[in-house]
Amino acid sequence: MAPSNVEPVHGRAALAILKLLSRQSLMTLAVNRPDGRPHAATLGYMNDGLNLYFITATDSEKAANIQADPRVGIAIRGDAEEGEAVGVSIDGRAAILTDMAEIEHVLGLILERAPEISPWAPGLGQTVVFKVIPETIEAVAVIDSRSHAQTYSIGDTEAVMAEVSYEPSAVARLF
């Protein structure tokens, strides 16, 4: 059961979170090993709205751990101005993408937003694309030189995104 201080994400909070996600390219991904110990790794990601995508080797420890337990934790840190989101902690579920249209969409986003890099691909069949759908996002903003955190429930990500008119350069205040 969610804590009582969790509220649905919308409006300014959603804009601030989207701005942070779009400005960054690295995340720390935490997954559960079979023996219960955490496994954390820093890797590149691409967001499409609130959903995050990453590519990893088919035989990686990350891939095996996620297939055994799809619950993941993600931390993303960025630079922001007063009142903007400076970091997020995301709890969600990850799954391997199998829909070729969605995989092509993600690869297109990478080429569009970061043409200087190419998706890591050691060879056909040796990588998988994962999609992380957030369930809760804890955003941290700096206000009056102090960190303030608020936890948001996501619910239907498409409904949240339908409410938001987003321009990556827009200034989005969190609180």
Image: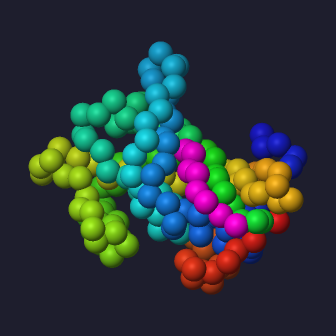
Residue 148 visible to an observer of this rendering? no
Whether the magenta-drawn stretch holds residue 79 is answered as yes
Whether the magenta-drawn stretch holds residue 131 is answered as no
Residue 31 visible to an observer of this rendering? yes
Name the side, left or right, on which 82 lies relative to 157: right
Percent from the top left, x then y, of residue 174?
A: 76, 66
Q: Residue at x 65, y 64 (%)?
A: 80
Q: Which residues are magenta?
A: 74-81
Name the side, left or right, on which 128 lies relative to 85: left
Q: Is residue 56 above or below residue 161?
A: above
Percent from the top left, x then y, of residue 83?
A: 77, 65
Percent from the top left, x then y, of residue 146?
A: 83, 51
Q: In the rendered view, how is the structure colored? A: rainbow
Percent from the top left, x then y, of residue 156?
A: 63, 64
- The quadrant the C terminus occupies is bottom right
Q: Residue at x 48, y 48 (%)?
A: 27
Q: Is residue 140 above or below residue 80?
A: above
- The quadrant the N terminus occupies is top right
Give the residue at the far top of this rendering. 35
